[in-house]
Amino acid sequence: MPVLALFGSYGYLRAFLVRFHKPMHKSDIPRKTIYRLSIYNRVLQRLRETGAQTVSSEALATAAGVKSTQLRKDLTYFGQWGTRGLGYNVEALAKAITGVLGMAKLQPVILVGAGQLGTALLRYGGFAKEGFEVVAAFDADIETRRPRDIKVPILHSSKMTDFIRERGVKLAILTVPGSVAQQVANELIAAGVQAILNFAPAVLHVPERIVVNNVDLAIELENLSYFVK
């Protein structure tokens, strides 16, 4: 998921900001485009780490696994980018995409269901690097011993609604059993959560305004098995 040459100086960056078109309404932007933006951002972050200053659309598209025409089309949803023959500035484009994705500052996230999968996610240290901060986890059982290296507070699920409302949390990771997933999702939505990353083996029925991304590991393995000979 996660080389570009127009905005290498402050002057170029300022020119870019002046030219930047007013973004379209979020509902007008295809979800697949948003997904690919995240991939472009990952590639740009890796380029920054290697010290690269510029990248061509062809190189960026290849690294992201898409056609250059698709890359340029995705970026036009948010304004005019780069210059023919010059490409893009890595730093400027990364910052712009980060802003578009709402990652200019750490986004608070909660996790619901601190079982084995939830615990593994809590131990993952890469969320902050990607612009997210898991501020709390919730579970019906807070007495079970969990790895000591987990720094995120694990609170009883009865405190979840008040916590969400007090902290203004909009994002949640759901790792509860499928039998209770819908009930928990309803509680999250009623409390103000607007987007759910669902690891539970259940299809969630939510209002149109709520965004749900499903991660069903069993289905993913089934899809992969089709290609195994």
Image (cartoon, rainbow, N blue to C red):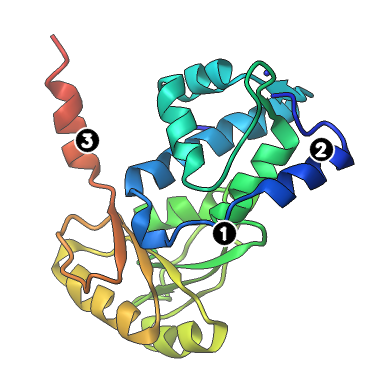
Horizontal placement of 141 versus 122: left or right? left
- The tag earlier along the polypeptide, 2 or 1, is 2
**Which mark is on residue 102?**
1
Q: Which percent across, then down, holds residue 133?
A: 59, 62
Q: Nearest the camera: 35 or 29? A: 29
Percent position of residue 8, x then y: 82, 31
SS class, disc 2 = helix
- Per the model, the C-alpha gap separating discs 3 and 2 is 44 Å
Please, what is the three-letter code of the amino acid marked with disc 2?
Answer: Tyr
CA separation in Å, label 1 and label 3: 28 Å
Left or right placement of residue 175 versus residue 25 in this view: left
Does 51 appear above or below 41?
above
Counting from the top left corner in percent of width and height, residue 38 is at 49, 42
Q: Secondary structure at mark 1?
A: loop
Label 3 is placed on what type of residue? Answer: Glu
Label 2 Cα crowd, 10 Å radius (few <14 / some 14-19 / many 20+): some
Q: Nearer the viewer, residue 16 or 228?
A: 16
- Label 3 vs 2, first from the N-terminus: 2
Residue on which disc 2 sits? 12
Residue lying furthest right: 10
Give the structural element (helix, strand or loop) at label 3. helix
Inspect this view and state whether residue 6 appears.
Answer: yes
Residue with the mark numbered 3: 220
Query: Which quadrant holds residue 42?
Result: top right
Decide: marks 2, 1 in contact (CB < 8 A)?
A: no
Q: Nearer the viewer, mark 1 or mark 3?
A: 1
